[in-house]
Amino acid sequence: MHGEETLRRAAEAGGWSAPKAGTHVGRGMALGQRPQGQAVFNAKVSVDENGRATIFSSVPDTGVGFYTVARQVVAEDLGIPVEDVGVMRLDTSQVDFDTGAGAGTSVGGANAALGAAQEARQKLTGLAAEFYGWAEERIVFRQGRVFVDGDPDRGVPIRELAARSVAALGAPITGDVTTTAEEPDVTSFCAQVAEVEVDSETGQIKVHRIVTSHDVGTIFNPLGHQGQIDGAVIQGLGYALMEELQSEDGRISTLSLGDVKIPATADVPELVTVLVESADGNGPYQGKAIGENPISPVAPAIANAVFDAVGVRITSLPVTAEKVLAALKQKGAGP
């Protein structure tokens, strides 16, 4: 459990105790906790005669980088370049059941892919022991080779083993794994500090900076990981300040994105990320899901910052200039 450390690191990076730059500048903080989801995922991994692997999955890549992460963990397990791992999208009729996108796709789906790769590797290990007379428990797969641990000269390229194995069995070497939906006893924390400036005459809010601190496991792909954080924080910014569903007589009157302001590049403040790393995730190689964690604390952090800046508490979203100005007028009028 890393909640306290995550909160402390956010406060440090956000300059929580530092002097403020103006009269109506405020800082707000919020802490979120999100258990690591789990669902049913199926994956098959097939190794052909060239030592190339293919992942078969019905899970779509909805922007969380599942295909990238799945290829990485399979390549790591088989000891082959990630370029030698492909993904084949299956129709849902080709699997018995699969939850699909959601519940930590890049963790759950990748867990299934890793399990399938491990199963295929175990089969190759048994064949290598049979072909070359090596002890199974000492066989390792690394850097495109299969060899005896501690004696790398006693080895062959994985392509040679794969070709011999496929020839002997008359088919590619495969693994097939389906995960369960049992919830893991693993959680993840996200702490955020927002710094805002409020125009007391108009109620307009300017967000200068958002610091987001995350309790993370092993990071597979730093670029994709940071992209998930930045995207989620910006979504949280829109939710906090501008995206609003209007209704009239019980019916939604906001019918399209043409009626909703969503964040543009000019609206994005300085974004600072702090990673509190620990290898205790439930994903492959102790990874954790990251995509949804940064969204939730943004709005309360901004609302708290507005209160710190001008002393009015806005309790409904979005926190608009109109709401702030009305609250300021009511505050000025007194009881």
Image (tube, rainbow, N blue to C red):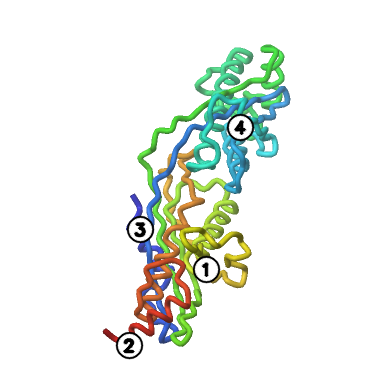
Residue at numbered disc 1:
242
User: 260 and 76: which one is in front?
Assistant: 260
User: 86 and 35: which one is in front?
Assistant: 35
Tell me if I can see residue 262 in this picture. no
Q: Amino acid at mark 4?
A: Ser
Looking at the rendered image, the disc whose residue lies closer to the viewer, 4 or 2, is 2
Location of residue 281 in the rendering, given as x and y in whole percent from the top left corner? 43, 43
Residue at numbered disc 3:
5
Q: Secondary structure at mark 1?
A: loop
Q: Secondary structure at mark 4?
A: strand
Q: Whole-Å distance between the Cαs marked 1 and 3?
A: 31 Å
* 264 relative to 65, above or below: below
Q: Residue at x 70, y 13 (%)?
A: 170
Of the numbered discs 4 and 2, the one sitting upstream in the chain is 4
Q: Amino acid at mark 3?
A: Glu
Q: Which mark is residue 333?
A: 2
